Amino acid sequence: MIPLADARRKALGICPPPRAARIPVTDALGCVLAEPATAAVAVPPFANSAMDGYALRAADAPGTLEVVGRVLAGSTARPEVGPGQAVRIMTGAPVPPGADAVCMVELTKPDGDRRVHIEAAVAPGDNIRPAGDDVPPGGTVVDAGTLIGATQLAALLSAGVAEVTAYLRPRLGVLSTGDELVDAGQPLGPAQIYDSNRPMLMALAGEAGCVAVDLGRAPDEEVALTARIEGALAGIDVMVLSGGVSVGDVDLVKVVLDRLGGGTAEWLQIAIRPAKPFSCAVLRDPAGRAVPAFGLPGNPVSSAVSFELLVRPAVLGMAGQQVTGRPRVQATAAGDLRRRPDGRLHFARVRLERGGPTGWRAVPLRGQGSHQIGSLAGAHGLALVPDGDGVAEGGAVEVLVTDLSVLGLPSGEG
Ligand code: AMP
Ligand code: MG
């Protein structure tokens, strides 16, 4: 058995560096910027009103002013504001020439159709958003290394950025293997189970910055499995396979990866539980491009944990993401996390609650078998239970947080 850190190094080691390209900004959602994006236009592009009110000369307020025009958002009217004059203005409308401030409408009173009474003093610049006060022209809107989400997209669009240099999201193909598998929606025959790993791994791939590609299912048969793998390589950047990496009679994934990998394949026994067996190899598409492939065990929890611990950091790196780890919290075991010594680091599914001396309590979930995906679905994280006899209730335990929604839990003992 090899330590987890060594296995992770191998997984990272077979992945190519992130690939940057010039892409339309609207395609960049979920991508990491490879170069800073600079503003094509100032934001805002022109001085405009922050309020509905009256544009005026600050020196004239308070007082009664002559209303000489009106500007709406989007309007190109440029009525000049002279001494003793005001222009009715709406939020976002360009400040008319001559005005140096805006008085909000709530502090004014109309006086007939052509006059307004300004009730408060106004300072120059009040309620005016100067051109470029958010982003100056040519200024950096979003830095290199930033993951583009909704708000970054908005900032880029507001600055007139049409294209960005971003790392392309790796296309991650998922192939499940197993004669017993049936797709969702089909009736189960004798000895059959639903293929839950393929959709799960595709979803995990999407969460890890990849574009998931469904490669379907392959039978436990060498020729067909080989053909499925080879046929998929041209359309993907990385492959994840589920099943067939253990020591069963038809565990052929490790065999086929070994043959296709031309000496690069590894079949590892990792000193962890679940997810001990793992295989990986560098395959080549017909053009000779390297495509890393990862063979994950078929037991659903093992599959998920392998992805979490080994594949996720590797593909986040391929996507150019800088943070490839998960937060960890120190918790108090709210129940026994007993185990037997076996030379392996155990990952126990736990729910997290606020409380205890460190601020977190880890509640062990029932059903810790590697086939029991139900308990993983209810887990907030994986408690690291080191080799030995485990951690008794009340003991200290470190938890890898996989569900960040726990950060929204109310804090304190309450
Ligand atoms: P394997 O790793 O192929 O030996 O499979 C180990 C266990 O995981 C067996 O009980 C399989 O039936 C189950 N399994 C394999 N592939 C899947 C899958 N795609 N979805 C759900 N369970 C699976
Ligand atoms: Mg199998």
Image (tube, helix red, strand yellow):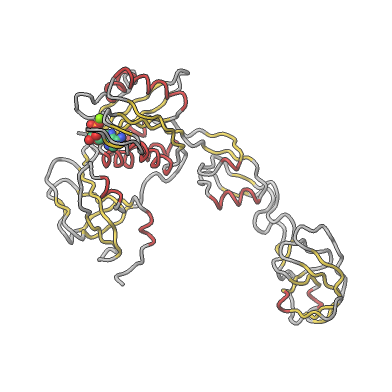
Residue 93 place in picture, x, y as percent: 75, 62
Q: Quadrant of the C terminus?
A: bottom left
Which x, y percent locates residue 69? 85, 68
Q: Is residue 201 above or below residue 97?
A: above
Q: Residue at x 27, y 50 (%)?
A: 382
Q: Residue at x 22, y 40 (%)?
A: 272
Residue 373 falls in which quadrant of the image?
A: top left
Residue at horizontal 31 percent and vertical 19 percent from the top? 263
Indicate left or right for 413 with 69 as reference: left
Quick check: which quadrant has ligand 1? top left
Residue name at image x 35 percent, y 29 percent: 217
Residue in front for this viewpoint, 77 or 101: 77
Q: Is residue 225 visible?
A: yes
182, 170: nearer the viewer? 182
- Against 226, is 198 above or below? below
Left of 112 or right of it: where is 154? left
Point out the image quarter for the N terminus.
Answer: top left
Rendering coords of residue 387 (x, y %): 16, 45
The residue closer to the viewer here, 395 or 215, is 215
